[in-house]
Image (cartoon, rainbow, N blue to C red):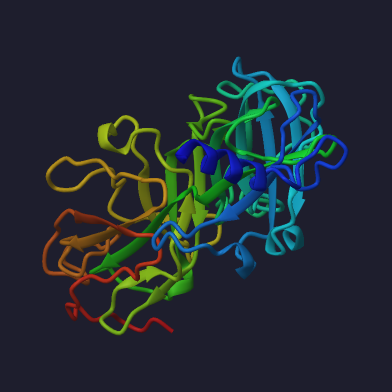
Amino acid sequence: MKQIILIACAAVALAGCVREDRSMCPPEINPNQTVTEVLSLRAFDIDTDEDITDTGTVTDATLVLFDPEGNFLEQIDIPGDRLMDDIEIPITLRDYVGDVYVSAWGNIKDNVNFPDDFSDANYSETRSLDLLHDPQYDGFHLCPGETFFGTQKITLGGLDELTTPTRQGETVVRRQQIDIKQKNAKLFVTARGLPEPGPQEDYYIVVSNLDDGYIFDGTPNTENPDAPADIREQKGIYQANGDLTSQAPMILIHQRDPEKVDQNTTMRLDLYRVSQVEGEPDIHIGGTVMSDQFGNAIPLYSGKQTSVLITFSGGCGCGAEECTCGADCDCCEEVKIVLEMKVIDWHEVSQWTQINFGHKDSK
């Protein structure tokens, strides 16, 4: 009796699925169907993991596709309006079946050198972008801006669990998502107890010994190891307690391995004051800063901000290197520097304990 009931139920269930009319039948995947591959690029905030694609934070993007051996396959440029509208991005590769590595970059137009043609590129060997040269200061580079990056392995061709089932004769669509987040590092500098403080616009920082680009897989890289990148930043501003700080964090190429950085590979900080005497070199204040008092080199983490506090002391009482002992000062003493540093979140506002050193006219 039980068997009769089961057979009857099956007959009812398949009543609408007949050879002449299969509209009531479940979808069947035809192995010979064409698979349309589409990508969706999403931007996420490095601190909150919030989807910020539709905020306009990322104004352009480029995807570069490579095969498992690292050989170039395809390049796709995406304007900002298509990103914000989440328009699916078709992949035009034909008859390719297998794994693909996607190198995705955002906010690269006008911020870095990003060539138009990568037909000879290799995923793990070729530089994807270079820092722009500073047109105002010869030999220096510009900061790369808030670059976004993500890399992911996807599968093209064939049918799998990512494929949307369709009826026989229809195109199979596979939609895969690529995520990108803030790629670079930030540096915020605070200078405290400046010798003979002067107008804030006269000060500038030189950051040296930096990589000047990335490889497609996201690894930091320098084109010429004997001539690492230097960046000049002249945007100081006095705070109420007399500290001279960056107006905003500098955005830099992050280090390859911040956990293992040493004084031979770390960045170097130099603070200068513009000379008031025509033809004279600018004043180098206190020497090069490379590490803190414990010998720890300055790290630059991807998606993080390094905040450094440089405290000056000594130097002929008032601290001026050019001071003549006995004239304007009571003693001759070498300018001493103490560096403190901390790693904070990308969007966090850098703050150090406020100690009122005071400063002379900074107008």
Residue 332 in the image: x percent, y percent?
14, 59
- In the depicted view, which residue is nearer to us: 22 or 175? 22
What residue is shown at x 81% (from left), y 35% (from top)? 168
Judged left or right of residue 136, residue 324 is: left
Residue 333 in the image: x percent, y percent?
14, 57
Judged left or right of residue 362, residue 221 is: right
Residue 160 shows in the view: yes
Counting labels gives: 0
Residue 81 in the image: x percent, y percent?
75, 63
Residue 276 in the image: x percent, y percent?
48, 66
- In the depicted view, which residue is nearer to us: 104 or 190? 104
Question: Residue 62's image quarter?
Answer: top right
Residue 138 shows in the view: no
Q: Residue furthest top?
A: 69
363 vs 338: above or below: below
Judged left or right of residue 111, residue 356 is: left
What residue is shown at x 43% (from left), y 48% (from top)? 207
What residue is shown at x 30% (from left), y 65% (from top)? 191
241 vs 330: above or below: below
Q: Residue furthest front?
A: 1
163 vs 185: above or below: above
158 vs 313: above or below: above
Q: Residue furthest right?
A: 20
